[in-house]
Every structure is written in structure tokens, then in C-alpha cells.
Image (cartoon, grey):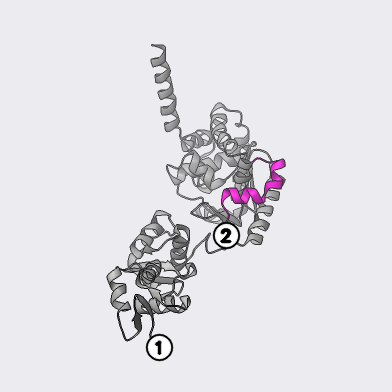
Amino acid sequence: MHKEKEVEKTAKKELSQERFSFLAMAEKILMDMSVRSGEIVRRRFGLVSSRGETLEHIGQRYNITRERVRQIIAEAMKNISQKLEHESFLATEEKIIFTIIENGGIIRETDAVEKISYSSDREANAIKFFASCSKKIFTVEEKGVLEKAWVVSRELIPKIKKIILEAERTALKEKKLLSDSEMLDRLAVLLLETSKEEILNFLSVAAKVKKNKFGKWGMIHWMEVSPKGTREKVHLILKEHKKPLHFTEIASLIDEYKLGKRSAHPQTVHNELIKDERFVLVGRGIYALAEWGYFSGTIKDIIEIILQRAARAMKKEEIIAEVLKMRKVKKTTIMINLNNRKFFKKQGDLYSVKK
């Protein structure tokens, strides 16, 4: 019986959490303001639409100056600050603080909103509104170093910046993508005062060092981190999967890893594969990277190159095995080309290029 009551209590608690609305709490905080002041605050913070309005836009709406709008908002925020110990505000504030602490003491604003509650843009804006009102939550942002983030202790900021700048130097020195373990290994000297988890949390707010869709660190301007065009996305997919893929599979993987805002069209992907020398056709619609040692040409061309590189006559089994490393074709197709006496000659069971 006691166990059943505990289960019921837990269920009710979870239900109440699901129904918790930051927007409703914001309205509760604003309800005793004057109609105009409340409306201006709502518009500025995006509590009535998907995004906040500019001071100028609000001023035009109410036929007042931008400076007057600023003054009204400042007065309103001053009144709100007197309610910071109110039970409703504390409960709301605590949810945000818990999320920040859970993330190692700092979290990108966008990530915080998504983790807490992203049922609508207005709800997300309400979360930002409460964070801006709080005296326990601090917003940090530094162009080129830190993205807009929330912290609960300003003392963390110098440590965070130190780790981010060291990670930047590491990425630029290595000139390649690094996994979590590789990045932590390079930053090992910092582990004396910071845990591995903290380092990775701090790096999540870096402006220039970013993880790509495959969880590897690099500079944000690198193609492997932020691929712009279809060719760059195709290259990244092949490089990460380390094996030849059909163009339709590549298109599906571009969508699966969300490398673009729009769905990748298979024919568009195919067209880009055809036009770029970095990609080599190795089978029907199957492409590999030239950097893997693949090269373009017909099966006849491949056989010629294999024999020339070997600098000796070869058995058909050897030739077939080497061709299959370069092309996904049937053995009979290889033999048809190999038996072309115009290009290849056979002596006993050995084949060579006809001169």
C-alpha cells in the first residue's frame, strides 16, 4: 500500500512538471503592472509572439521614443526585482539554475532553453525572460571566444576562457579533427585543476572550436566541421564512413546527420559526385574518395595501372583481387577486359600489358 502511494506521488510530481509553464509564470509576475508597461515588456521579450521586438518598433507602436521604451522596461524590471523572493519566481528560477549546474556550471542559452522546455517559441522566450530577471543567473558572451551562455558563478569565466583558448591553439596546431579523448589528451595539463567532464562542458560554449555532427572537435570554419555546399557534405560523409557508398545512401546520410536545412536530393548528390575529382566511381552509382588510393578510369585502365605498378606479369587471380579493391564489379567483367588481346597478352598463366 505504501509503495502504491509512493508511485502515485511520483506520477503526480511528474505530471505537475509536465504542466509547468514558464509563460504562465511570466504572466503571473507581470499581471499587476500597468497595461502599457506590461505590454511593452511582453513585446520586448517575445512573450506575445515568436520573437522579441526592437525598441524602435515598440516605440513606433506606442508613438514614443526608443529611449522612453528603454526607461519603461528599466522601471518594469526594477519592479520585478522586488518579487525575486516570491515563491513563484524562486520555483521558476530554480529550474533554470538546476539545468546550468547539471551542465557543469555553464550552458549555451540555446541549449538551456532546449533542455528545460521548448514547447513553443514563446515558452522559450519566457525562460530567457526569467534568466534576465534573476540575480543568480549571469549571461556571458564574448565575440570570437564565448557564445551567449548562462553561468551561476562569474568566477568560472577566466577558467572557461583559458580552456577554450588552449583548445583553439590545439586544433590549429593539429590541423585535424579530434575526438573527445584526443582533445582531452592534448589538454591533459589542464586536468590538474579541471575534470574531463568540466573541460568538455566548457568547450560546448566556445565560439570558434566546435564539434561536428560526428562528435569530433575542430575549428568552426573548417569544412569538416561546418560543410556548406553539397560537395563538402558528401566528402564529410565518405570520410567519416571510410568506405565507398552509393549516391542514394550518401544523400540519406546527409539527412540523417542533419548536415543541411533542406533534404538532400539524390540526383543533386550524384551530379556533384560526377563533377568533383575528389570522388571516384567504383561501381554502379558507388563512389569512393580519391585520397584512399582510388583512381578514375575504365576496368581496362585499372588493369593497365595495376600491371604497370607491379612491373611484372601477374596471374589472373592476383589481377582480379587488385581490381576488386578499386572497383565493385563482377569477376566476369574483369576477365572480359583482361582477355582483350589488343591491350593485354597472356603467356602461360601470366598476363602483362601489350606493348
Which residue occupies 37% across, 78% down?
351
Which residue occupies 72% across, 41% down?
192
Which secondary structure type mostly characterizes the magenta part of the structure? helix
Crowdedness of circle 2 by 10 Å Cα count: few (<14), some, many (20+)?
Answer: some
Residue 290, magenta (yes or no): no
Residue 205 visible to the viewer: no
Residue 329 position within the rendered picture, expressed as x and y whole percent measured from the top left: 32, 68
For badge 2, the amino acid type reads Ile
The stretch of residues the image draws in magenta is 177-195
Residue 97 position within the rendered picture, expressed as x and y whole percent measured from the top left: 58, 35
**Which residue in the protein does label 2 denote?**
220
Q: Choose between 238 and 321: the one closer to the eye.
A: 321
Contact flag, marks 2 and 1 (Cβ < 8 Å): no
Q: Is residue 129 above or below residue 254?
A: above
Q: Which residue is most to the front?
A: 348
Q: Disc 2 to disc 1, how far (Cα)?
A: 52 Å
Residue 192, magenta (yes or no): yes
Give the total of numbered labels: 2
Crowdedness of circle 1 by 10 Å Cα count: few (<14), some, many (20+)?
Answer: few
- Mark 2 and mark 1 lie on one chain; the one further toward the N terminus is 2
Residue 123 position within the rendered picture, expressed as x and y whole percent measured from the top left: 46, 41
Q: Choose between 40 and 17: the one closer to the eye.
A: 17
Q: Choose between 272 and 283: the one closer to the eye.
A: 283
Residue 201 position within the rendered picture, expressed as x and y whole percent measured from the top left: 60, 44
**Which residue in the protein does label 1 denote?**
355
